[in-house]
Amino acid sequence: MNVCCSVYKNENDFVLFNQHICATIYSIMNNNLGKFNVGYLYIILTAVIWSTGGFLIKLIDASPIFIAFGRSFVAGVFFLPWIKFKKIRICKELVILSLSYTICLTTFVLATRLTTAANAIAIQYTAPLFLFLGLFVFKREFNKSKLLPITIIFIAIIVFLIEPKTGSNVYGNLLALLSGITFASTIYYFGFDYGISSTGLTGLLNLLLLPLIAFFVPWNVEIFPKDAVSIIALLFLGIIQIGLAYMFFNKGRRTVDALNASIICLIEMVLNPIFVLIIIGEIPTIYAFIGISLIIIGQFLNVMSEKRSRVA
């Protein structure tokens, strides 16, 4: 356990902190719940399911590269009925999207195994910073209203990177950063028209991931799950954590706008480390505590800036 964890008098301190954040998120969306909208329940359920990724990845007794491979294989098979292969529009954007998605998912799994789950998920959520920088460098797009949230997210990254070295956490944090960069690229290129539905595209990306990382998988008996719990967890990651969660998200988005959905999905950053704490016993460091707080604030301000831009 990291000595920095000593700032928490007990494990309940961290849980109470995250409960406070959940309550804040609920109060933000409370104005929209005057008239019951089942779409919010689907988005919340999606965020909860996504939050299981941290402890499941740590629970599986197998090579992290194989976990990334196996999860996407299961998810790809799950989505096969929605993939209209004859309608796929092959283009350079699809190539970039496939590479971005592959690197994003693979580095996230590696990061989760090498550093704390709290660090891995929080640093991945720094994607808006890299999306902002990418649009500025390649598209010359500059939005002044995003300067404050982007600055806060940048400070959060610094907090994670100055975290004292313990074991392999430095490598894990850097891989999580790469996951955040490629997550931004995935978000951007996912918006292009590829001739198939977004559900089919999600399945296609998981299938395209397989040959891209198969070369890096050390194919021997040691890489495979070694017990029933690991096998069940891997199947859960593919069918439920990616497959079913996306179906819930898609259903919820029919009645919940993107801005409110973005705010609700911040629950994942809160619940992920809580599940890991309860099931694995891993306690985030004070650096993670500060970093997560800054990223949640930055993400919220980023979403609010989008809302103001649309109103204007």
Image (cartoon, rainbow, N blue to C red):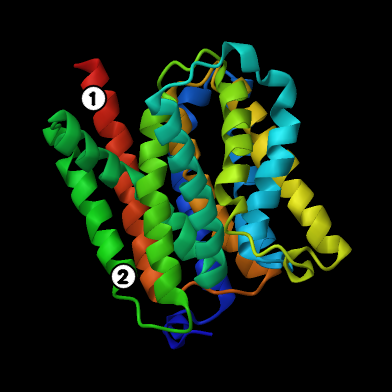
Residue 299 at least partly seen: yes
Q: Residues within 10 Å of mark 2 (few under 14, many from 20)?
A: some
When asked about the image quadrant of residue 112, the answer is bottom right
Residue of label 1: 308
Q: Nearer the viewer, residue 162 or 201?
A: 201
In the shown orientation, is residue 121 left or right of residue 67? left
In the shown orientation, is residue 93 left or right of residue 237? left
Q: Position of residue 66 (x, y in %)?
A: 67, 58
- For image coordinates 35% across by 48% down, the residue present is 181
Tell me: residue 148, above or below residue 97.
Answer: below
Residue 39 at least partly seen: no
In the rendered image, the quadrant that contains the N terminus is bottom right
Q: Earlier in the sequence, mark 1 or mark 2?
A: 2
Tell me: residue 118, above or below residue 188.
Answer: below
Residue of label 2: 161
When asked about the image quadrant of residue 78, the answer is top right
Label 1 amino acid?
A: Arg
- For image coordinates 15% across by 32% down, the residue present is 143
Q: CA distance from mark 1 to mark 2?
A: 32 Å
Label 2 amino acid?
A: Leu
Mark 1 secondary-structure assignment: helix
Q: Nearer the viewer, residue 62 or 278?
A: 62
Q: Nearer the viewer, residue 97 or 30?
A: 97
Q: Position of residue 311 (x, y in %)?
A: 24, 17
- For image coordinates 59% across by 74% down, the residue present is 282
